Amino acid sequence: MTKIVRYLKSLTLNEIRKGLMLTQKYFFKRKFTVRYPEEKTPKSPRFRGLHALRRYPNGEERCIACKLCEAVCPAAAITIDSDVREDGSRRTTKYEIDLFKCIYCGFCEESCPVDSIVETDIHEYHFESMGKNVMTKEQLLAVGDMYEEQIAKTKQEDAKYR
Amino acid sequence: MSPELFQQIIFYVFATFTVGSAMAVVSVKNTIYSALFLVLCFFNTAVLWLLIEAEFLAITLVLVYVGAVMVLFLFVVMMLDVKQAKASQLKQSYTKAALLIAAAMLVELLMLFGYKLSGQIPTNELIRQEQGYSNVAEVGMELFTKYVYPFEIAAVILLVAIVAAIMLTMRKRPGNKQMDASKQININPSERIRVVSMKAEKGQGEDS
Amino acid sequence: MELLEFLIFDNLIYILAIVLGVILTVAYLTYFERKVIAFMHVRMGPNRVGPRGLLQPFADVLKLLTKEIIFPKNANKFLFLIAPIITLATAFAAWAVVPFADGMVLADINAGLVYVLAMTSLGVYGVIIAGWASNSKYALLGALRSAAQIVSYEIAMGFALVGVLVAAGSLNLSEIVRGQEGGLVHWYIWPLLPLFLIYYISGVAETNRAPFDVAEGESEIVAGFHVEYSGAAFALFFLGEYANMIIISALTALMFLGGWYSPFTGDSWIAQPSIFWFLGKTSIFLYAYFWLRASLPRYRYDQIMRLGWKVFIPITIVWIFVVAVMKVYHVGPWWN
C-alpha cells in the first residue's frame, strides 16, 4: 500500500518542484560577486605582497647590508653583495630578490633591524619575459619610493600587534 | 526550367544516389560504412517517395528506419568490433542464397516491367491528388478498415517478438552486482537513519 | 524561370530568415543560460564584454571560429567533419514546419508532427558518427550512451505526440494549434498534462541536456562524443544542440500551450493571437531548460533508462486511452 502511495506521490514531481523552487529563490538573492578590477576585497595591513626597499626621510637608504634577510630566507631568494661606500659606511652593491623563488613568508621583513626590506600589499604584478622575475636593488628602491606613504601607513596600523 | 523538368532532374539525381549507395552497402568492406550507406539509401528512397506524393510514408521511413532501426544497427556494429571482411570471405557460403534472392527480385522486376508494357498499370503520368488530400488520413483509413486483420496480426507478431527477445536476454548472472534503481529511489530515510540525541561531551584536556 | 523565382523569393528568403533567426537566438541563448545559471548560483555571470556582457556570445563565436580544428590520429576525417554538419542540418531542418503565427510557416505539410519527430531523431547520427570517427574511447562511449538514450526517449516522446494527435485529430502543426483556440482553458496542457510533462522531460533527454547529459558527463567520460572536437566543428555541435533545444521548446509551446494564441479571451489587444505569444511561450520552456540544469544533479545511466522505459512509456500508453475516451465522450471545453 505504501508503495502505491509512494508511486503516486512520485508522479506529482513534488520533490523536483521543491528543488526548483529553491534555485528560483536564490535567483532573486543579492549577488555576492566582487567585480574585481572595479571592486576589491579589503586587505589586511599584514598582507605580504611585492617587496620594496625603504629609505629614511632624508633620502638615505635604510639597508646596511647586514645580510640577516639573506640568511633567514627559507627559499634562498635573496642575494646580497656589499662594499664600503665613499663615506665609509657599509652599503649593498647588489640586492636581488628572485620572485619565483620567494614564498612571501615575510621573514626578511621581520629579520630586518632597520625596517629596510618590507613587503607591500601590492599583489597585482606580472613579468613579461624570462629574467624579469629577479628584482634588482634599483627596482626595489623604486617600489619603495613610489609606495612609501602606503607602506608607512600599513606598518603603523600593524605596529601595535608586533 | 519547367517544374516537370525540375522534378525529373530531382528524380534522376536521387535515383542515382539510391542505386549507388545500395551497391556501396554490399561492396564496401567496413561494416560501419556499409550501415551508413544504407542510411543514405533510405534517405534517397524517402525523397523518391516524396516525389510521388507519399509524404507520410517517406517521413515514416526516415523516422522508423533511419531514426531508430539503423541507429540500433550502428550501435550493435560499433559494440561488436566486427573485423573488416576479407575478399576471400565474401565469396563463400552466402553466395548461393544471395543469388537466389537476387534472381527472385529480378523476376519480380521483370514482371513489373511486363505489366507496365501490357498497360495494366497506368504509366504515362502519376496519379495526382487534389489539394487538401491527406495522405495520413487515407493510410489510416485503409489500415484500419480494409487491412485491419493483417495489420493487427502483424502487430501481435511484433509484440510476441519483443516479449520473446526480452525473455531470451533477461537472465541473472551469479555475482552480478547490478543495482535496482527503483529500490534505491523508493527508500524511506526513516527506515535507514536513526537520529540519536546525545549529551554534549566535555572537551578533553581543556578547562571549560 | 517561374520555378526559380518561386524557389528564391518564396522560400529562400524565409529559409534565410529562419536560419539567421535561429542562429542569433542560439547566440543569445548561451548568454541567457550563463546568466540564469549564474543568478541561481548567486553569481553575476558574464558582464565584461560589452554593456552587461551583451557582446559575450560574439566574443565566444569569434574565439571558436579562429581556433584550429584538430584531427585526432587515425580519425576518419570525412566522417569526423560531417558529423557536426549532420547535427546542425537536422536541427535546422525541423524548423521548416514550425508555424510561428497563423499562416507564418515555411512548409505547411500534413505530416508535420511526424516530420519534426523524424528530424529530431536524426540528430543522433551526428553524435554517433562523431563518436565513432573520433577514434577515442571516451567519444565512442559517449556516442553509445547518447544513441541508446535518444532511441529510448524517442518512444516516450512519440507516444506523447500520439496523445496530441488523438486530441487534435491532425498531424499538421497549424491545425493542432487551431484546435486550441479560445483562451487558457482550451489549451491541450490541461487534458494532456501528463503527456505534456513527459514530452518536455523526454525533450530534455533527447537533446542531451542536464540532468540527462550522461552523453557528455564530464566526470565520467570527459566530454563524451565531442571530446576530440575543437574550433568551428565544436561550435557547430554547440549550435545544433541549442537549435534542438529551441525546437523542443517551440513544439511544446505549439502542441500544449496553444502556439500563437493568447491566454486571454475578449476583444482587447492583449487577447489577439500573435507571434509574440508563441515566442514568449517558447522562452518559458527555454528558461525551464536552464532552471533544470541549475537545480538537478545528473541522473545515473540506469536510472535514465528506467525512467524512460518503466515510467514514461506506461504512463503515456495509459493516458492515450484516457484522451481517446475523453475525446469520444466530448469532455470539457476541448472537444465539445
Image (spheres, coloured by chain):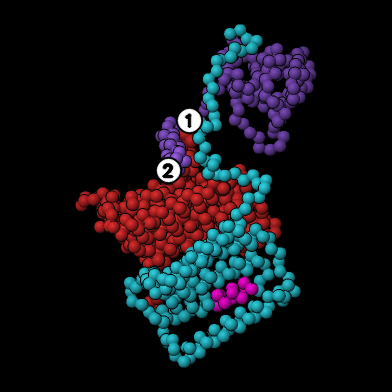
Q: What are the residue bounds of the magenta stretch?
A: B16-26
- Vertical side of A154 occupied by B159: above or below: below
Q: Residue furthest bottom?
A: B118
The residue sitting at 33% across, 50% down in the picture is: C190
Disc marking residue A64: none
Residue A24 seen in the figure: no
Instruction: Say which colour chain A has.
Output: purple
Q: Colour of chain C?
A: red
Q: Position of residue C153 (x, y in %)?
A: 50, 54
Residue C208 in sight in this render: yes
Q: Amino acid at mark 1?
A: Phe
Q: Which chain does cyan denote in the image?
A: B
Q: Nearer the viewer, residue C159 or C91?
A: C159
Q: Chain of mark 2?
A: A
- Which residue is situated farthest in the left direction here? C267
Q: Chain of mark 1?
A: A
Looking at the magenta stretch, what is its main secondary structure?
helix
What's under tag 2, amino acid-wise?
Answer: Leu
Question: Which of the pair B165/C294 is nearer the observer?
Answer: B165
**Residue in the foreground of this view, choosing between C187 and C71:** C187
Residue at x 40%, y 78% (from the top left corner): C1
Q: Is residue A89 magenta?
A: no
In the picture of the structure, the residue carrying the numbered disc 2 is A8
